[in-house]
Amino acid sequence: MRDRPSGTKPHQLDPHARRILERAELEGIELIRFLYADHGGVIRGKAASRSRLAERLSTGIGHTVAMMAMNMLDQLQEVEHLGPVGEVRIVPDPATYVPLPHAPGAAAMLSDLCLPDGSPWGACARTFLKEAIAELRTEGYTLVAAFEPEFTLGRRLPDPSGGPDRLVPLDDSLCYATTGFDTAHDYTIKLIRALETQGLRVEHYHPELGPGQQELSIRHAPALRAADNHVIYRETVRGVAMRMQMWASLAPKPLADQAGNGCHLHLSLWNETQNVFAEESEVRDGFIGGLLAHLPALTALTCGSVNSFRRLAPRTWAGAYAVYGPDNREAAIRVCSPLGETGEPNLELKPSDSSANPYLSLGAVIHAGLDGIRRKLDPGEAVDVDPDTRPGRYPRLPKSLDEALDALEGDEVLMEALGPLRRSAYLAVKRSEAAAFAGKDVPYELFHHLRVF
Ligand code: GLU
Ligand code: MG
């Protein structure tokens, strides 16, 4: 490396970092994007050039604290300690380096936002998840997770009547229909190759219900890796489409009158030897009870945008009721039957979409489940009907972002888990989004969500 900073000799780098430098050189990488997810659920970052990478791997890149007070419309909110004064570092995790197939010459690394002395910062989302994982560990458990994202593939076109750009879906194929496999074929093959190259294992693919709607799921992984994978996934879904002059949107409802894009969370909980969701137990019940008890508040984090609540409606398989049931696709929590003898039983949380910050979302899920285990919460009876067919009997989840934020503010466990800086910033950012879209028309909301997610 020609321009190695003085004081950073190759032998002083840890083996991970040395391998990254070698790979970047070999792979012809010029820019390495250090990525993080913000409180608006937006993936942002800064990039280091290869010639400065050795130093940046250890120092990170300097960043303003204010970006964690920015909403998804790039409107900066007033949050104490997140103003024009103050500095953090975007510090990449060496285990996450991936060259980006959709952006030749670029690689990415998932990053933490740290204080200048390298210590954890109270507004970093990835740190929140790491701390939740550590907390769960103190009880002897690890969480394995998979995100099951749906997205809409099409073209972003100007509105003929001068309104904001719209997403015009690729096709009008039917759900699971082979026409859809063919219309999206070139894109899907490129996408799968790009994901696999980055170390994500593709599980299943099919054309979904809505026009241009696709579902492509990724194999489960330990919680932090699963959330990192989902960031890479979002980047790749969009990036591959852009290189093909298309537009892919993971927004919860990019087309107001069509099926929404969920991102169901599949969860299994492991002790030293086994999946504790494999059979009924106090721990499994407690985890479900914890999710149910915190669900209204949890949706403020797992369904993080104004657009999320256009999706989260009954009879759309989005899980709009706070109930659980075996293979019940209208329950917020589906207890999934395992696939074959080697399959692992898992829980599927349906009120979840890709406009959420995946680190906050999964971290909050852990805290909710853990609270249920510790307090031995009773999940009540499993529900084996569509809850919407029993009016008034089952609790409906929040119908708007503001309603979900009210629930979050009233949830002591989640507020405490988020900590003072993160919770004040999250609430300020999300309240501002709710206010910004109130009174605006539907095309405005759709455009601003499909532009970002
Ligand atoms: N599109 C549905 C949602 O918004 C999910 C459909 C399915 O079960 O795959 O969650
Ligand atoms: Mg689906």
Image (cartoon, grey):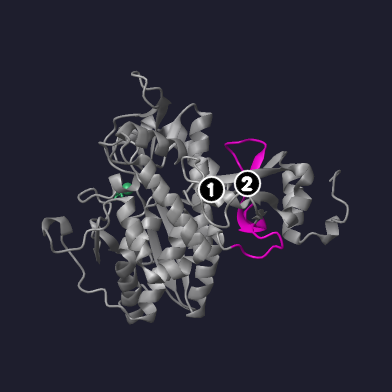
The residue located at (37%, 31%) in the rendering is 182
Image quadrant assignment for residue 395: bottom left
Looking at the rendered structure, which numbered label has been put on residue 207? none
Give the labeled residue for mark 2: 108
Image location of residue 379, percent across then percent down: 26, 73
The residue located at (36%, 57%) in the rendering is 405
Residue 217 visible in image: no
333 lies above or below 2: below
Q: Is residue 431 magenta?
A: no
Residue at mark 1 to residue at mark 2: CA–CA distance: 9 Å
Q: Amino acid at mark 1?
A: Ile
- SS for dot 2: strand
The residue located at (35%, 46%) in the rendering is 306
Q: Would you say 290 lies left or right of 34 here?
A: left
Image location of residue 162, percent across then percent down: 37, 20
Q: Are marks 1 and 2 in contact (CB under 8 Å)?
A: yes
Image location of residue 141, percent across then percent down: 47, 76
Give the labeled residue for mark 1: 232
State the residue in front, 162 or 223.
162
Residue 422 visible in image: yes
Q: Amino acid at mark 2?
A: Ala
| Number of numbered labels in the structure image | 2
Q: Would you say 207 lies left or right of 88 here?
A: left
